[in-house]
Image (tube, rainbow, N blue to C red):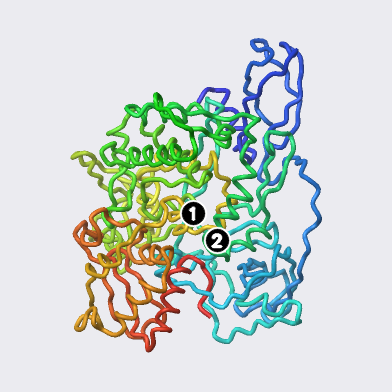
Amino acid sequence: MSPEVQQVNRNATDGGGTAQTFLVTIPENVYPGMTFNVNAGGQKFKVTCPPNAGPNSKVRIVAPTVGQNSQAPEEEEPQAAPKMQVYEVIVPQGVRPNQPFTLMANNQRVLVTCPPNVHPGQKIRFQLPVANSKPSKMNVQLSYKDDSGSSGWERTIRVTDMKFQWVRVAEKDDDDDIKKLDDFTRGQSAGARAVEDMEAFDFSKAAYVRKIQYLEGNDARMRTGSVMLVPAQEAVVDSKLTDHNYHGTSQSKTLLTYQDIATVQSKSLDDKVEWFHKNVCEELYSPWEKGHVKIVVRRHALLEDSVSAIMALGRDDMRKRWRIEFAGEPGIEAGGLTREWFQLVTEKLFDPDLGLWISSVNNQMAMQINPASHILCPDDYLKLFRVLGRVMGRALFDRQLIKGHMVRQLYKHLLGWPITFDDLEAQDEEYYTALKKFTTLEDLSIMCLDFTVTEDMMGLRKDIELVPGGAMKEVTSENLPEYLEANLKYRMLNRCKPQITELMLGFFDIIPEPALTVFDPNELELILCGLPTIDMNDWMDNTKYSGYYEHKGKNDKIVKWFWEVVQHDFDQEMKARLLQFVTGTSGVPPRGFSVLQGNDGNIKKFCIHGVSRDQYVYPRAHTCFNRIDLPNYSSKRELREKLGQAVSMTYVGFDIE
């Protein structure tokens, strides 16, 4: 960064805000030394034309810094004050004054802080905006503590500022004495539970969420920034989205609020997608007459031309209407060329031969970032990840599909979902097992560990420090939590931090983060990659059986019920969700289920493992082995109900009640 840009970023971060610079066009009849008005980022201010500029030339300006605790002036369309609903609840046992606790309200888990001088058993009141439509009754509230991918972490809405925050609730008390005290609130508030302090490190509960600090780069068209993992309970995101340059005008418009999100997040995936495109994408699109983009590429140089075109666009251009053309080919763009372009570009970017991605050891259909990509593509690997992020964001914006499934933690990073040691197990079970074993040792000195990891980069072994001075820092029982945390952060982010940073910066050049809060990681994969084509005969022919079902196999009564439910009762989306639930991705290997891989890179066929209904109520998944633990249900109806709930609500984050 140039000294000027470094100072812009320094001033912003020192003030707890975000750096903002803008490219503006100097109006007609404005010359050096003259002032003109600018509206940028929801703010209006005067700018003096610099000595080396003139009419119609573009100059870079620095907007006044907006801190975390301040608000930029907005000129939003007049809105009626939201209708508020009063809730009254009894503070649950185990909650101290000033300690947060959660409860269900408005079909949404809500975070409330116990007021000072209030103790368990006393009543408190709070208010929430009423959702745009009457919330549907929650018949099922489901969360797997260890197998859902969220390890008990739930996204809540903070009553104090209406921002989303992740919390992990304490174990539910069987004698839950929360009562709704009048008909107005009856049925709308339930399940009040204390939030765990999470002060002491716990291998099974610890979770981290990525945090992005946006910065300005030398090129005003491109943001830069830093990404880090923070404790999940410190991660927040706005529940409101305002466009400060609505349709290229100086007007601001609020596109969505907490009430909108609370209304739509319990709907079907199709309904969510329709809502997202109507209320976010169509509203953010710049009108055709305000400017549009034509991208012309040559087939023999498709990736090169596409990269050049996309990197030449500013963030405003990313939301203009695009028209894709292939050089020298006649034809009218009616959508087909655009679909083909998205498929071809992403296929090339995800191709392992390019060096950016490699197949996951757990599932060859899920791609993970190649840690050696900086060696294989030293000159342009970061640029290519920025392009891919922009293409993915634009695909989501345009209802297009991409040609590449990513490992699950990358979808979580995009959505700002918690990363846990379960994600590390799904990526590398052997690595996870070794770390977990350290928690059972009384004397760690016998392991002779330090804060480093050894990487094999293109045949060269290199020691990487997990913390500054890690090579000289011995792992002890006292600092073991720090060592485990450092390992998780390294494998989930820091190992490929520059690549992940560019991928996310490109994605968020287009997609506003608050609009993504209605989706979970499984849904984001299905939206971006589309529903897979599944050959049921191939799936059934290449499934093995163990546990209670090993003896009779496919002839077992419960196994027959399972396949009848999947084949006849599950639609295409539910089949894809079942595949995600068990294997970690909705991708099907090109050669079919016969070559489905496990975490060791060997063939691990889809497996149905029989367990006792007394052991588990709901089916459980082991993505490392492509195995589903299926209880021996007493009826086909119960199997259909429990399997459907487990598959469709894996990431909902409510409690079993």
Q: Residue furthest front?
A: 331
Looking at the rendering, which quadrant does residue 385 occupy? top left
Amino acid type at circle 1 is: Val
| 56 left or right of 535 in image | right
Residue bearing mark 2: 166
* Circle 2: element type: strand
Disc 2 and disc 1 in contact, CB within 8 angstroms: yes
Residue bearing mark 1: 209
Q: Nearer the viewer, residue 424 or 296?
A: 296
Q: Residue furthest bottom?
A: 634
Q: Is 13 located above or below residue 484 in the figure? A: above
Q: Residue at x 32, y 39 (%)?
A: 356
Amino acid type at circle 2 is: Trp
Measured Cα–Cα span from mark 2 to mark 1: 9 Å
Q: Residue at x 77, y 59 (%)?
A: 82
| 433 left or right of 260 in image | left
Looking at the rendering, which quadrant does residue 105 occupy? bottom right
Q: Is 416 located above or below residue 621 in the figure? A: above
Looking at the rendering, which quadrant does residue 121 occupy? bottom right
On residue 396, the disc is none
Q: Residues within 10 Å of mark 2 (few under 14, many from 20)?
A: many
Looking at marks 2 and 1 on the same chain, the residue that comes earlier in the sequence is marked by 2
Q: Position of residue 355 (x, y in %)?
A: 28, 38
Q: Is 76 located above or below residue 375 in the figure? A: below
Q: Position of residue 510 (x, y in %)?
A: 54, 40
Q: Residues within 10 Å of mark 1 (few under 14, many from 20)?
A: many
Q: Is 286 located above or below residue 183 in the figure? A: above
* Circle 1: element type: strand
Q: Residue at x 65, y 24 (%)?
A: 24
Q: Position of residue 158 (x, y in %)?
A: 65, 61
